[in-house]
Amino acid sequence: MQANGTGGQEPEPEPEPQVSCRNGESSSSAAGAVHSNGLLSSANNGLPSTESPASDTSTKKKKRLSQSDEDVIRLIGQHLHGLGLNQTVDLLMQESGCRLEHPAATKFRNHVMEGEWEKAESDLNELKALMHSPSAVVRMKFLLLQQKYLEYLEDGKVLEALQVLRAELTPLKYNTERIHVLSGYLMCSHPDDLRAKAEWEGKGTASRSKLLDKLQTYLPPSVMLPPRRLQTLLRQAVELQRDRCLYHNTKLDSGLDNVSLLIDHVCSRKQFPCYTQQILTEHCNEVWFCKFSNDGTKLASGSKDTTVIIWQVDPDSLQLKQLKTLEGHAYGVSYLAWSPDDSYLIACGPDDCSELWLWSVQTGELRTKMSQSHEDSLTSVAWNPDGKRFVTGGQRGQFYQCDLDGNLLDSWEGVRVQCLWCVSDGRTVLASDTHQRIRGYNFEDLTDRNIVQEDHPIMSFTVSKNGRLALLNVATQGVHLWDLQDRVLVRKYQGVTQGFYTIHSCFGGYNEDFIASGSEDHKVYIWHKRSELPIAELTGHTRTVNCVSWNPVLPGLMASASDDGTVRVWGPAPFLDSQETEGLTDSGFKLSGP
């Protein structure tokens, strides 16, 4: 029979070998000699055996395997070899007519793992003809000699190591900077010191396996498979499915141990924060703003009723209870900002408010009440990352930087501020203004530059944790996503109703993969960051939803503030039967609150 359809005379049929399947092992009569490396023996030089088990179809030609079939067989063989099922690998290769890797690569692998460096170097000459880039031999030889040098040093053979460095590594004239580093290891007085400085596992299987992984990158996969290739492909498939899952809102585990490969990845919509957990009715007028603390343990809400309420979050039940009420904001509270360590909370009012309140969260006491002039309008605020300064401003042209006592540190004249954000560098402040743009202002060198230009007024904006993306609520246009680094508009999200009211949207979810915004049609909209169409529309509020805040620590918890005087807390679904879930539509959620 022709092996894998290759030419040659058909041999006489052999007696059918006896194969034992007990405990999943094959007998040696079927598998041939047992090979410690799990690869084909050197007797046939890694080539498929020309002998095939006899059967009623033994006189027919074996069907030629496609390239993809051969690739799959090799991947399976590599995986089984990694599990130590060496007899099974040999039998698979014999029966399929494939080979796991080129016989020259097999020899090379064995010599590297056994630390036979001269033989491994000799193998490189045979492998050179199989490489796409023969010049890679120099780089491979360098890696081999580096391992040889380190192992000599660890064994205390300093003279031998020095000989490798001078007579073998240096003449390669490759990576001289690395050779200088290697020469410094001669001063190490103890093997532990060497391993620490070289960030090396030491002589043995672990470091040699890592070396093989590096060496393989210079060899075509037809000669030697990339390490753990099947696991890599499976992990990529799982990650791709997760990326495409619209409702994936949990930590990404890069391993395969907690994943079933037998079914596709899918997240239930019922795990998403789209169900009313609680309705907070303690405010007695329109609620203009709400914001979770940075540690996710508290929620602050500000209202037209002149109060700020701080709520405590129960991480287990996802229920909120009233903790403190901060009173006396005569014009109402339209914006709130937690300090980086959540110890302070700043409250701002609407356009006609010239005052700013800085509260101690723990004591509930007012630390600073700041007002530079009765003609000011202080409607927005942002904390410097150091927690010792903040910037504030408004549409009447005020733009101040202050300390915690309200003392004016710097000011910028003539900037009509709509919304503010401090960049993580501690120097730059982003400000949207009445010219439909966002500019960056550096308070240290007093420079400014244009970053975003819209065609309509920017009512509010927020920035992602990594500082790369900005989410804008644009008058009459809706929600826009901008890349601040490339200064380009990335996406326009559909569905939301946005006129000239100030509505605050937010990033959210475990990896900030989601975007949520209020709307003048009384709904909360949620989008996946990569999709323009909403994946959920949350109903329950009866008037404009002014603000949405997603808990930064508990990705299944979200809050929304509305002109209807309530704050709604959204979380995963309670235990629902099939009849109760029939309200879910294909486009997302259209859920009514209680």
Image (cartoon, grey):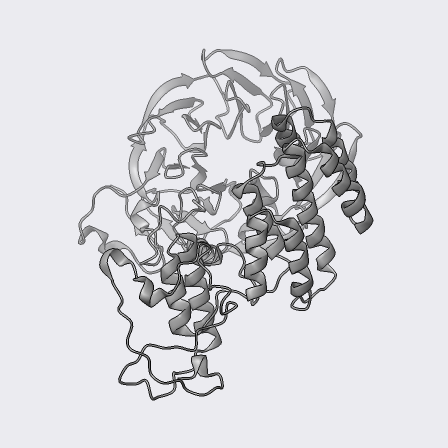
Please tell me whether residue 227 is drawn above or below residue 519 in the rendered image: below
Please tell me whether residue 266 is drawn above or below residue 384 in the rendered image: below
Residue 228 in the image: state x and y as whole percent: 48, 54
Quadrant the C terminus occupies:
top left
Q: Choose between 287 and 30: the one closer to the eye.
A: 30
Residue that appears at 60% across and 21% down = 387
Left or right of residue 552: residue 459: right
Residue 144 in the image: state x and y as whole percent: 67, 49
**Can residue 394 be seen from the camera position used here?**
no
**Can residue 185 be seen from the camera position used here?**
yes
Residue 407 in the image: state x and y as whole percent: 67, 15
Quadrant the N terminus occupies:
bottom left
Left or right of residue 422: residue 276: left
Please tell me whether residue 65 is drawn above or below residue 356 in the rendered image: below
Residue 83 in the image: state x and y as whole percent: 39, 52
Left or right of residue 247: residue 44: right
Q: Choose between 23 and 466: the one closer to the eye.
A: 23
Please tell me whether residue 229 is drawn above or below residue 17 in the rendered image: above
The mark total stands at 0
